[in-house]
Image (cartoon, rainbow, N blue to C red):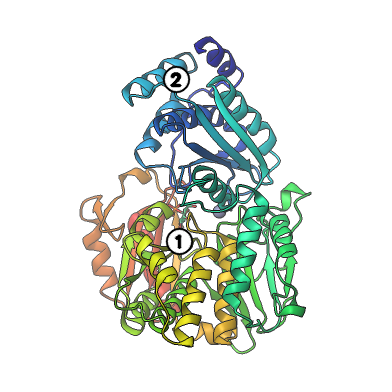
């Protein structure tokens, strides 16, 4: 087998002098540099699967919101969560092994991790719509074959669909079964749960969905075939930016990242004032909502607003279901969450807020400490996770009134509708539609639940971003020495000022975030902190 792996790896040689790192989003870079990395990720999947007694590992080839010429690859653990942190290091090691040492490093990992090479290995994989995807799939398949890994190629999928299928595959035929192991099973699960959660309520007007010209487009259109139409009180959806034939259009002038960073609708949107709109990102694991207010212009309903909406609704339901004393609801955010949202959750809703470092795996982990853990990054990546106790309470509590029965029924439906493995734009979209329908809210009513503090996010190019070391969920700098004191004294000059600087995990830059009482003060503070770290 070693000779076969070596021979195959020689067809996917590592480019000279390139250093790779498994970061918050796996490996991500210009697609033409990825061939060797994807091959080696295939080998890691084999090791990981064998280490876990032959459970199936997921592999997703995508670069999410990055430009079309980029691509990336990430691994999914058996329950559909992100690869366990300690394995990021092993992946990095194998990706950086010299061509001639590859088999040696592979076998050494196998030995060090006490992996029995005789254990069967299984993997499933999918890709987004990028033009570079099929060639990278070939590299992956070569590694899976030569490492003796049994695999299923699911073709094009959204990232959360691959997470769903990974979990379904590993729980099939057990009491923890997560759903039917097929793409169709995903649509059926979502649509059945949606109809049940809506409980006869209807949405008002259409929702315009911008699919970033990515894989979310065809998958949303597929999902719509399973959902009830407006005639039976279902959804009215206008799909835009669903061109997957022209690869250059991906994430171009559209998509969640464009809308969030440019603070404007995609130019292609024909939505009228006050119309509900949302944008997915390139692999449909992020979603943000927005609308154009005739008085105040563009209004963004970001991940913070989705989190507060979900926490409010689930909080109301648990009270109506008489479960609020036994179930702990909490919200997990990162330092990028707007201060007004944190304040709203703690003071108005009365739920605890936990702050974690950037990266969904941290948020997800913290959310599982609650019975109902609502987590969203401000950029729209997130979901709600339910503890086994919460699920048990939803399904076994004997209702003593019709109102309690209804609330329990809706909670059960939500636990099916919400993707428990990872943030899922399609599932989150249906969740928001459900809540707005129940509350009979327009986006404007949702928007006015609290008012965001003006804020500014700046990307600062520095010589070496690795000198910036943080603590306290990335909110304080410990290195370079003295910088935090200077930052603190800048912040002190601004009313409601808050600012932090951290090295990006996905780009070669430092990000500076600032918020303050007014727009100009937030801009000013961001500028001053950027100058400090530059
Ligand atoms: P970095 O580059 O580490 O700031 C960005 C996003 C994260 C997360 C990751 C993974 C911001 C400020 N940061 O991380 O929220 O989504 O990419 O894609 O949006
Ligand atoms: Zn994404």
Determine whether the residue tagged by mark 1 lies in a helix, strand or loop.
strand
Determine whether the residue tagged by mark 2 lies in a helix, strand or loop.
loop
Q: Residue at x 66, y 62 (%)?
A: 254
Tell me, for residue 458, which label it has, or none.
1
Q: Residue at x 46, y 52 (%)?
A: 176
Q: Is residue 66 left or right of residue 337?
A: right
Q: Crowding at label 2, few (<14), some or many (≥20) Cα neighbours within 10 Å?
A: few
Q: Residue at x 40, y 48 (%)?
A: 462
Looking at the image, tell me whether mark 1 or mark 2 is earlier in sequence order: 2
Which quadrant of the view contains residue 401?
A: bottom left
Tell me, for residue 97, which label it has, or none.
none
Q: Is residue 14 left or right of residue 511?
A: right
Instruction: Give x and y (percent) for residue 513.
Output: 39, 64
Q: Is residue 185 left or right of residue 306?
A: right
425 versus 496 height, above or below: above
Instruction: Give x and y (percent) for residue 239.
Output: 74, 66
Instruction: Give x and y (percent) for residue 253.
Output: 68, 61
Residue designated by label 2: 118
**Cα distance in 3D space between marks 1 and 2:** 51 Å
Instruction: Give x and y (percent) for residue 241.
Output: 73, 61
């Amino acid at each position: 087998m070693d000779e076969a792996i070596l021979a195959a790896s020689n067809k996917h040689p590592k480019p000279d002098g390139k250093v790779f790192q498994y970061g918050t989003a796996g490996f991500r870079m210009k697609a033409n540099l990825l061939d060797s990395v994807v091959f080696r990720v295939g080998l890691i999947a084999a090791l990981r699967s064998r280490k876990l007694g032959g459970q199936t590992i997921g592999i997703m080839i995508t670069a999410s919101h990055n430009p079309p010429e980029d691509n990336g690859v990430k691994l999914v653990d058996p329950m559909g969560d992100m690869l366990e942190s300690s394995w990021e290091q092993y992946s990095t090691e194998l990706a950086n092994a010299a061509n001639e040492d590859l088999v040696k490093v592979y076998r050494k990992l196998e030995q060090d991790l006490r992996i029995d090479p005789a254990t069967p290995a299984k993997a499933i994989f999918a890709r987004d719509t990028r033009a570079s995807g099929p060639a990278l799939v070939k590299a992956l398949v070569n590694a899976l074959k030569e490492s003796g890994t049994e695999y299923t190629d699911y073709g094009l999928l959204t990232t959360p669909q691959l997470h769903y299928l990974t979990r379904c595959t590993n729980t099939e035929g057990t009491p923890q079964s997560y759903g039917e192991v097929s793409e169709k099973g995903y649509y059926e699960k979502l649509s059945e749960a949606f109809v049940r959660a809506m409980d006869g309520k209807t949405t008002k007007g259409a929702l315009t969905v911008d699919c970033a010209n990515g894989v979310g487009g065809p998958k949303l259109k597929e999902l719509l075939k399973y959902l009830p139409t407006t005639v039976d009180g279902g959804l009215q959806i206008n799909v835009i930016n669903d061109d997957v034939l022209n690869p250059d259009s991906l994430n171009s002038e559209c998509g969640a990242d464009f809308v969030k960073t440019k603070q404007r609708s995609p130019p292609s949107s024909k939505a009228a004032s006050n119309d509900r709109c949302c944008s997915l990102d390139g692999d449909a694991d992020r979603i943000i909502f927005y609308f154009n207010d005739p008085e105040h212009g563009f209004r963004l309903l970001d991940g913070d607003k989705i989190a507060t909406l979900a926490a409010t609704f689930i909080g109301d339901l648990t009270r109506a279901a008489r479960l609020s004393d036994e179930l702990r609801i909490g919200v997990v955010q990162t330092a990028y969450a707007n201060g007004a949202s944190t304040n709203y959750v703690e003071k108005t809703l009365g739920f605890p807020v936990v702050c974690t470092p950037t990266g969904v795996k941290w948020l997800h982990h913290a959310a599982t400490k609650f019975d109902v853990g609502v987590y969203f990054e401000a950029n729209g990546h997130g979901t709600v996770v339910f503890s086994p106790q919460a699920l048990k309470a939803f399904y076994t509590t004997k209702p003593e009134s019709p109102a309690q029965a209804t609330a329990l029924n809706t909670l059960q439906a939500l636990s099916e509708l919400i993707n428990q493995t990872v943030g899922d734009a399609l599932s989150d979209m249906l969740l928001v539609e459900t809540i707005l329908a129940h509350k009979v809210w327009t986006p404007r009513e949702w928007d006015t639940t609290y008012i965001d503090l003006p804020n500014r996010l700046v990307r600062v190019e520095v010589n070496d971003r690795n000198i910036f070391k943080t603590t306290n969920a990335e909110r304080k700098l410990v290195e370079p020495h003295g910088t935090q004191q200077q930052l603190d004294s800048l912040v002190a000059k601004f009313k409601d000022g808050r600012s932090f600087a951290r090295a990006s995990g996905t780009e070669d830059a430092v990000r500076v975030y600032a918020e303050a009482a007014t727009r100009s003060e937030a801009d000013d503070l961001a500028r001053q902190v950027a100058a400090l770290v530059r």
